[in-house]
Image (spheres, coloured by chain):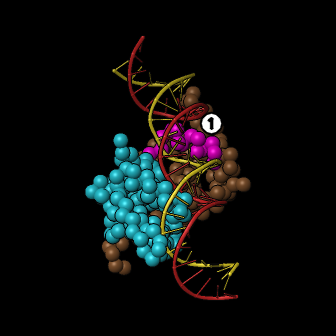
Chain colours: A brown, B cyan, C red, D yellow
Amino acid sequence: MGERDPTLMAGVPELVVLRLLAEREMYGYEIARTLKVVSRETLSLGEGVLYPALHAMEARGLLRPHPRQVEGRTRIYYQLTARGRRRLERLTANWQRMSAGVARILGTSGHE
Amino acid sequence: MGERDPTLMAGVPELVVLRLLAEREMYGYEIARTLKVVSRETLSLGEGVLYPALHAMEARGLLRPHPRQVEGRTRIYYQLTARGRRRLERLTANWQRMSAGVARILGTSGHE
DNA sequence: GACTATACCTCGCGGGACGAGGTATGGAAA
DNA sequence: TTTCCATACCTCGTCCCGCGAGGTATAGTC
């Protein structure tokens, strides 16, 4: 129960969301915008990805919601839990291992 | 109507298989072994991933099979088509864009 | 009164990664 | 000789999850 790894496949959305939240509390819409800017448009989570992902992560106890009213609109800020932090470390390590692997394959020019 | 991109998600198996075959003809079993070695165990395609992937790519015209009998065993060598080569370039570019994006997110220490 | 930006949400589709299981051969070990 | 491992192919079912499309509501602008 819980903490099943993305095997080969990326699980990129979960990873990057956790990483952003590790920096500071953010709400969904903000996450989407920030992601675009920081990644320079190369990463953009549609809302059909983002919100379900947030809910799933909340359900798994990786983050905790803090709803607030700001100018008549509801924002749900999310905060990383300790569990979420551990998860982040794990996913980061996985990502680095596997992207290094891919890089090695891509960089194979016959020899090496 | 082929050539739909893996959106955010990696599509790593397809990418790395194409990359290996760009170097030389290989057969399935060989691909699996080579992948492990070159990526230093960080990438390993189970046969439940590999063979279906090969068939799918063949169906899309990305590679062409060349069955051979070697010491009583059947080996199906695969060769990249022109279409497969184009696909490889495309996926490679995608991968680089998106892994750079992830790297940027991971490397964000608040400022920058 | 229409449109854009903000801010949340859900549903259903489809693709694909995966484990488990299955067939068959050749050679080495027991 | 039978058992076992490596080689070499295969399929099936599941489950996850990325995604687009669509939906609600408010605040401010044109």
* x 37%, y 61%: residue: B65
Q: Is residue A42 visible?
A: no
Q: Nearer the viewer, residue B88 or A41?
A: B88
Q: Nearer the viewer, residue A82 or D4?
A: D4
Q: Which chain letter goes with mark 1? A: A
Tell me the quarter of the picture where residue A87 sits: bottom right
Q: Nearer the viewer, residue A3 or B16?
A: B16
Please state if B27 lies on the left or on the right of C18 as rendered: left
* Residue B68 versus residue C17 in the image, above or below: below
Residue D21: % across, % down: 46, 29
Q: Quadrant of the N terminus of chain A?
A: bottom right
* x 64%, y 37%: residue: A67
Tell me the quarter of the picture where residue D26 sits: top right
Q: Quadrant of the C terminus of chain A?
A: bottom left
Label 1, on which residue?
A68
Amino acid residing under circle 1:
Arg
Q: Is residue B50 magenta?
A: no
Residue A107: % across, % down: 36, 70
* x 51%, y 38%: residue: A47
Secondary structure, magenta segment, majority class: helix
* x 41%, y 71%: residue: B69
Residue B16: % across, % down: 41, 63
Please state if D27 lies on the left or on the right of B94 as rendered: right
Identify the magenta region. Answer: A40-57
Q: Nearer the viewer, residue A1 or A17?
A: A1
